[in-house]
Image (cartoon, rainbow, N blue to C red):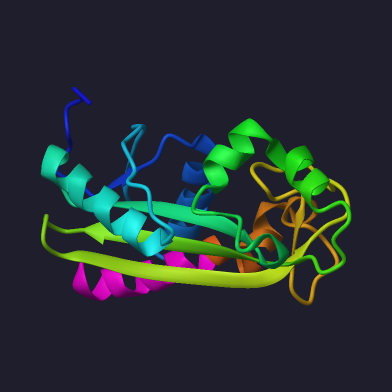
C-alpha cells in the first residue's frame, strides 16, 4: 500500500463490482468518496461485525485517513449459516455451482444476506452499520450478476438479485440498507 493517500473519505475494496454498486448508492445519498483498491488481511471470526471493525481499525492505523469498508456474507439456514463470513472464499473456490450442489437435496432453502459497513474516523472510533435481507436460494443460477446474486432470491420476490438488475436490486439489497444507514449518519456526524 505505497499509494499517496488523499485527505478525503476512502472506500477500501479490491472488488470493482462492489465499488460501482456502492458509488451508485452513496451518490444518491450525497456522500462522495475516493476508491482505494487494496487487499488487506482479515481476521477469522464467525461475526461479520468483528471482521469489519477490526479490518477498519487496522487499515486506519496504516493509512491515517478516514475510511470505510464493507463486509458481507450469505448465510444459509440448513447449512448452519455457511458460508457466512467465509462467503468470499467459498465463492472463489466452489462458486455458485458448488453452493447449489450442496443444496441439491435440501428442501428448506431459507437464507439471508448480511452487510456490515465499518467507518473508521480514527483508530478508536469505529462505527458499524448493518443491513440484512432474508430470502432463499434458487434451484439454479438465474440472471447475470456478480457474487451470489444469481442464486439469491430476496423475500417477497420471484427474481434473483442478478435478474433484477442493479437499480431494482438496490431498492431491496442488504448493501443498500447498510449504506443508507451509513450515509444518513455520515451526513450528520462525519
Image point 11% across, 61% down: which residue? 124
Q: Is 36 within the magenta?
A: no
**Residue 67 appears in the picture as rendered:** no
Depth check: give the residue in front, 162 or 136: 136
Q: Which residues are magenta?
A: 176-190
Residue displayed at 15% across by 65% down:
125
> Which percent across, then down, holds residue 103?
80, 53
Please state which of residues 136 and 187 is positioned toward the viewer in this rendering: 136
- Magenta span includes 179: yes
Quadrant of residue 167 in the image?
bottom right
- Asked which quadrant contains residue 38, the reply is top left
Q: 121 and 34: which one is in front?
A: 121
Q: Is residue 32 left or right of residue 130?
A: left
From this viewpoint, which residue is outermost toward the top? 2
Quarter of the image with the C terminus in it = bottom left
User: Residue 137, position in %: x, y?
Assistant: 78, 59
Q: Quadrant of the N terminus?
A: top left
Q: Mostly what secondary structure, the magenta segment?
A: helix
In the picture, measured across the screen, residue 105 lies left or right of residue 144, that is right
Q: Is residue 167 above or below residue 111?
A: above
Residue 57, position as x, y percentages in the image: 19, 52
Residue 70 horizontal/vertical position (percent): 41, 53
Identify the image quadrant of residue 108. bottom right
Amino acid at each position: 500500500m505505497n499509494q499517496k493517500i488523499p485527505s478525503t473519505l476512502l472506500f477500501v475494496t479490491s472488488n470493482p463490482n462492489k465499488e460501482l454498486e456502492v458509488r451508485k448508492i452513496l451518490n444518491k445519498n450525497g456522500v462522495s468518496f475516493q476508491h482505494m483498491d487494496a487487499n488487506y488481511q482479515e481476521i477469522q471470526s464467525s461475526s461479520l461485525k468483528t471482521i469489519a471493525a477490526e479490518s477498519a481499525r487496522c487499515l486506519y492505523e496504516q493509512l491515517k485517513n478516514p475510511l470505510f469498508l464493507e463486509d458481507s456474507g450469505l448465510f444459509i439456514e440448513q447449512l448452519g449459516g455457511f458460508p457466512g463470513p467465509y462467503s468470499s472464499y467459498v465463492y472463489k473456490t466452489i462458486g455458485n455451482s458448488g453452493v447449489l450442489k450442496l443444496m441439491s437435496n435440501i428442501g428448506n432453502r431459507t437464507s439471508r444476506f448480511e452487510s456490515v459497513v465499518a467507518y473508521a474516523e480514527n483508530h478508536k472510533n469505529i462505527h458499524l452499520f448493518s443491513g440484512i435481507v432474508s430470502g432463499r436460494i434458487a434451484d439454479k443460477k438465474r440472471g447475470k450478476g456478480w457474487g451470489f446474486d444469481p442464486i439469491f432470491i430476496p423475500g417477497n420476490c420471484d427474481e434473483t438479485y442478478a435478474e433484477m438488475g442493479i437499480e431494482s436490486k438496490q431498492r431491496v439489497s442488504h448493501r443498500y440498507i447498510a449504506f443508507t444507514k451509513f450515509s444518513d449518519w455520515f451526513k450528520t456526524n462525519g
